[in-house]
Image (cartoon, coloured by chain):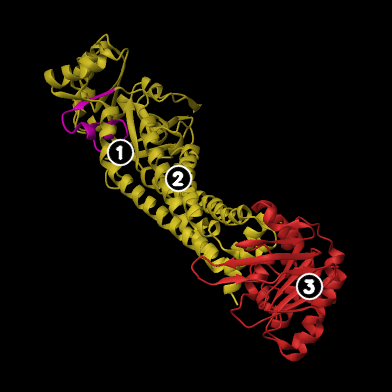
Amino acid sequence: MVRTENLTFKYHQKETVFQFPDIDLNQTENLLILGKSGIGKTTLLHLMAGLLKPSSGTVTITDVNLQSLNSKQLDKFIGENIGLVFQKNYAVRSLNVMENIQARLFFCKKKVDHSAITNLLQQLNIESCKSKKINELSEGQLQRLGIALSVIHEPKLILADEPTASLDDENCQAVMSLLLDQAKKNKANLVVITHDQRVKPLFQNILEL
Amino acid sequence: MNIWKISIKNLFHKPLYTLLSIIALAISIGLLLGIRQLDTAVKQQFDNSLGNIDLVIGAKGSPLQLVLASVMHIDNPTGNISYQEAKKISKNPLIKTAVPISYGDNYKGFRIVGSTEQFAALYEAELDKGQLAQKAMEVVLGHTVAQQLNLKVGDTFLSSHGFMDNDMDVHSDPLIVVGIYKPTQKVIDRLIVTNLESVWEAHDHDDHKDHENHEGHDDHSEHIEHIDEDKEITSLLVNFKSPMGLLTIPRQINEKTSMQAALPKYEIERLFQFTGIGVKVISWIAYIILIISCITIFISLFKMVKERAFDLALLRTYGASNFQLIKIVAYEGFLIGVLATVCGVIISQSGLFFVYRMIKEEYKQTIMQNLSYIDILQTSVWVFAMIVVAITLSILPIISMNVSKILSNEK
């Protein structure tokens, strides 16, 4: 359950004030946010992820108002309840695949369930890369590891920032179905921001900025 | 998974960088520790060699030379003094013991010192085997001498004239080993001790050939008296009853006799003032290397924070707090510090091992090889102060990190 109300945001040095329409998603409802670049898509995503503080308005995730939390509580809440997917899916480069997942779970204080991890890696078809270093992975494997890292801790909200921008049609479909699939399995809300029109048919809820 | 593991993985991720930081720091620590320990060991060794000698009385000349020759046994003597005159001084009530020594020969580079039975007492040396020299031409070996020359009680050898080992000027009368001292770590370890008569006999043989054939001296005491009269010794080692002696006797000797009195403690202190400059210069070089290596650590940590800003921001979205990120960086610095300190101690100890071995071969002197914990502790405190500064500076970007900006800029 995700809700935003009267969100506005202004960057320090800049004049422009971003004003965002309200969002209200019930459990398992997904949302596609479309818009040209520079219109504040990533800003909105980061506001929802608690990485930015809004100038005004509130973000509520599973009945918790992010603005009411102190920074320590916020760190904890983000770690436990939100999964972020980036355009270029990064993982920590000094750790291998398995260690990245263990680190992900360590920081949000979740137990390492080996069978669950193996299961997830199998679903994403990267189980064989378990002990590979990050720079040994292909672009596609890295993308799927990014998805794994965003869902392994069973988040309530998965936020994806341009997940398909650099992918061809086939991989675009594959990544989107994986994301939708994982969101469904975790009973999480999936919010995708993109300017990629190919993704449009997969969503009922579409917000154009 | 925990913070330590992440720090270790980070260090292994850039092994060359890590190795460079550790090596640079280890070398400076090794140099610092090595020079400090050597300094302490040498000073200790000198202090130790003084034994119970408060004052040396010898021929006029350089007082430092007199001390180095008669106390340290590493320099040539300033000359000889009359045994008769020396004996007079010994009667002073402020003097507890006055030990005459006389020398001029060596065997394979080890000095042969003629003295009285009190000589061993100056160094608290006890017999390990055999007995003390009773008659002329009997010798007792210091522990190092016996060990290095592989001599046993009952062995005989021919001494040679002077302080350098040579085959040119060998005395014809063999000396016999009658005893061996226990190790003391003092100068007596590398001396061959005999009685005064042995030294006199070896040297005066040619000059007083007619002396032995002299008919008129049947009275034994008169004979001894006669010997004492024209006998010379190299120096007199004095131990006072009370510090009062220090105030009056040296001046008295220097002003009223043809001899000089030198205070070993004072002369050695003066010597250290000269050599101290070298130690200081090396210490400063080591400190400069230490600072440079800490800058290296700072740069590598700072670069890690900057280069992996995205990784760190990512960890923040995983739920890591700022404090946890700081811990990751701090642990890395700490690990480098600990590894470098361990390597530094190993470097200094192995370096000192070779230096000590060199000293042993060069000066025939074994040095007490104590690990100086105070030196290690002091150096470690320095190193860790530096590392804390390096860590503090390199974590500043973490404190002011803008996760959102880093994550959106990386696209």
Of circles 2 and 3, the one toward us is 3
Give x and y (percent) for residue B338.
55, 50
- Please, what is the three-letter code of the amino acid marked with disc 1? Ile
Of the residues tagged 1 and 3, which is closer to the observer?
3
Give the left or right position of residue B1, taking residue A17 as reference. Answer: right
Local SS, label 2:
helix
Rendered image: mark on residue A190 = 3
Task: Look at mark 2 in the image and give the residue it sits on.
Answer: B382
Above or below — where is B291 with respect to B315? above
Q: Residues within 10 Å of mark 1 (few under 14, many from 20)?
A: some
Residue type at mark 3 is: Leu
Q: Residues within 10 Å of mark 3 (few under 14, many from 20)?
A: many
In the rendered structure, which amino acid carries the disc numbered 2? Trp
**Circles 1 and 2 on the same chain:** yes
Q: Colour of chain A?
A: red
> Mark 2, residues whose alpha carbon is within 10 Å: few (<14), some, or many (≥20)?
some
Residue B229 at what x, y percent from top left?
19, 18
Q: Quadrant of the C terminus of chain B?
A: bottom right
- Residue A191 placement: quadrant: bottom right
Indicate the chain on which mark 2 is placed: B
Is A204 situated left or right of A159 in this image? Answer: right
Q: Position of residue B123 (x, y in %)?
A: 40, 25
Instruction: Name, please, the residue furthest toward the bottom.
Output: A169
Pointers 1 and 3 in contact (C-beta within 8 Å): no
Q: Give the magenta-colored segment's residue range.
A: B55-77
Magenta run includes residue B51 = no
